[in-house]
Amino acid sequence: MEDIHPAPNLDPMSQPSHSVTSAAETGASAAPIRKKDYIQVRDFSFNYTPAVRVLHGITMDVPENEVTAFIGPSGCGKTTLLRNFNRMNDLIDGISHEGTITVNGQDIFDPNLEVISLRKRIGMVFQKSNPFPKSIYENVVYSLRVAGQRNKEVLDEVVERSLKGAALWEEVKDRLQQSALGLSGGQMQRLCIARAIANQPHILLMDEPCSALDPIATAKVEELIMELKKQFTVVIVTHNMQQAARISDRTAYFYLGRLIEMDQTLKIFNNPQKKETEDYISGRLG
Amino acid sequence: MVWFSGMWLGIGLLMIVTLLGVIVKNGLSIFWPSRVMEVELVEGSPAAIQGAKVLAGEVRKIQEKSVQAEKGGTAREKQLFVGNRDAFGFGFRYVDESDIAKISYPEGIVLAERVEYGDLIGYPVSLKLATGEVKADSADFTALLEQTVGAGNARRGEIESIEKDQIGKINHRMGVLRLSQRKAELDGKITEDYRTEIAAELAELQRRYEILAGKAAALRAEQKAGLFVYRLPTGIEREIPAGDLMQYYYPNQIGFFGRVGHFFSEIWHFFSREPREANTEGGVFPAIFGTFVMTLLMSVAVVPFGVIAAIYLREYSKQGPLVRAVRIAVNNLAGVPSIVFGVFGLGFFVYFVGGSIDSLFFPERLPTPTYGTGGILWAALTLALMTVPVVIVSTEEAIAAVSRGAREASLAAGASKWQTIQRIVLPASVPGIITGLVLAMARGAGEVAPLMLVGVVKLAPTLPLDTVAPFIHLERKFMHLGFHIYDLGFQSPDSEAAKPMVFATTLLLIALVVVLNASAILLREKLRRRYASSAF
């Protein structure tokens, strides 16, 4: 069976790298090297159909153990890029791409790569919480079950650890065998986070995880994200700029399928280099 | 427009309710013991039976009839069920109301169900037993009659048990022995020892058979020993063996609760007994059982077939002109006349598949076919083929309705496509699959035409399930309620006598379909609650 603990890095990228590499036209800003890059995107373009190109030559690096936020108006391609990281776009017919994306040094479009093993290393939380119509327990252990784990002790331990990690344990520990569909919206989303981290992935992708939640639930999830970045590399798509400012270390601004600017969050929000970024942040656009 | 469409819906509902009402009323009234009316006719009435002016019977129908103008337009006539088919040669008589001189409901009249010739209606006269004749007016006649009929029923049960079960087992064993000898001969492995061994066992079985047959013959003779003497309403005295009486009651004596009790016991007999007298009397148990087993077999065959096809069409195949053509073909398959499926089933399943099975596995039985003739398995498969489009379509819809979110969550968690189908898509589609099954059963259980070609019979000697190994006999022919209706209503020698049975059987068939559907729907509701997020 698949090891449930993170495998040692397959091919650690040891090349010296700048933490931010923007597309040529955006102009690079030289930030100090702090952490190695985990996801590297190089000249990546993506088409849904040959005529519809939604991403244009994206080049970026997502550093390890940080929260990277993707912001931008609707339809700017941020979710599409996020869904490329674990190849969820494979479900769509007629897609094509150019350029490369590497995760931990490995080309994710390598034909020899098994998509399943890639997805095991990348957890994903969706915009709309989507628990399975199963018990809370079975929801959390789903990724282990499909990997063939049958040992009850391991599963119990994973359930407790993941639910604690998702700050849900105290609320549901007495009703693990009840249907997950009986939870509140915020609880469901945290359950989805617990499910995403159960297999101890390296990366956690979050696609607007708080868009359907009330402020209290949002605060809980945000707190959780801050906590999660100690263990995981988090990439979050958000429409909420305050949220991006609060929780992310780095922010990337997308507009019409192009990466306009990517830098440390404080810089983006206080001193953006590009006029489009400033317009968007100050609310004149989008 | 709302009113217009609503009106048509109303008319449709009204028609359905009326039809059901007619079936329920006619179907149930046969079990209700109505009073027996004795009629005295005026002189020269054409209704007189064998010249007698008196006749008695249950009033089944009162209707208007047109008569010649000089008599004055219309007249009313009664249809009386006079029974005693052995004496009169018919069971029903129409009597003009103008011909009736006197109507009475005599207390002493008895209505008895017999093993032959339908019901008897008459006045008991005496019982001629070995111990002597007991007159009907003597004090112990009632108790004695009850005892005699009870003993006769017990003896009949015993005869049946001997002839069907015990002799049946011996016959089965003899057949097996002969077949194994024939098989050894065909394989060229026959030895003289084996031949004598089989001959010895056959002789032993033959000896046991003769003992049993003797026992049965003795019991039969006993059944004929006592005589029940009765007087017809027309005045003639007749006698029948007391052992031929199955049950009797005094229709003009029993009270309301007696009637209700009789009503339910008649319904129970209808459910639980086997048909007699060309299916016009007795119960329909083999037909209920055959319909039920065949529908279950069909469900067992149709669900995996339909679900796997739907999974392939929806999840794996590349959506294109070819798949679209396949889908159109599947939908059109549902519109093919059922008799065509019957012909296909006969040609493919019975002759080709069944014939091949016979020549491969049962060469010793040839030329008698085993699977190469109509049987419950082929009937179930033919109907499964006929109803598979329904299951495919509804399963496809259910699969398509499984939310994208759930699929993506599963794939993102590292599940393969098949794991996602197995763990997420199929469980959520179960209610939709069951919807398809309900529709398939509703169509399959009521279908008759194709069955006539692939295994349904008027009277099946054995049930497809019994206590002889291997317990399930898929090659056997069976009875079916739908065919039973056709047979009773249109092939029966006495269609007037069979009419109530037709209604009762129709009611039963509808009830069976409703029960099968209701249980599937209940199951679906239960599952739907469990998978509350699913759209189906």
Image (cartoon, helix red, strand yellow):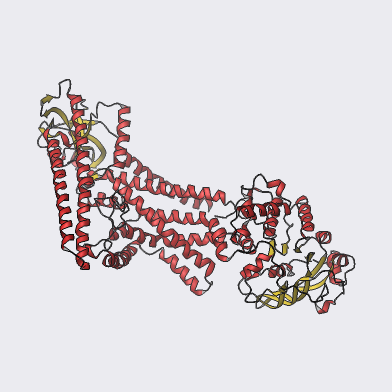
Between residues B507 and A121, which one lies in front from this camera angle? A121
Residue at figure coordinates x 81%, y 79% from the top left = A24
Q: How many marks?
A: 0
Q: Please, which residue is most extreme toward the top here?
A: B139
| In the displayed structure image, the side of residue B525 where residue B98 appears, left or right | left
Between residues B176 and A26, which one lies in front from this camera angle? B176
Give x and y (percent) for residue B429: 53, 57
| In the displayed structure image, the side of residue B79 where residue B126 appears, left or right | left
Q: Please, which residue is most extreme toward the front here?
A: B193
Give x and y (percent) for residue B241: 13, 35
Q: Work out which quarter of the rendered image holds the C terminus of chain A and state it.
A: bottom right
Name the quadrant containing residue B306. Answer: bottom left
| In the displayed structure image, the side of residue B513 where residue B76 appears, left or right | left
- Residue B355 position (above or below residue B135): below
Give x and y (percent) for residue A272: 88, 69
Can residue B29 be seen here? The reply is: no
Name the quadrant containing residue B94. Answer: top left
Can residue B275 be seen here? The reply is: yes
Give x and y (percent) for residue B327: 47, 68
Q: Work out which quarter of the rendered image holds the N terminus of chain A and state it.
A: bottom right
| In the displayed structure image, the side of residue B353 where residue B300 appears, left or right | right
- Residue A272 position (above or below residue B255): below
Name the quadrant containing residue B153. Answer: top left
- Residue B142 position (above or below residue B369): above
Between residues B505 and B528, which one lies in front from this camera angle? B528
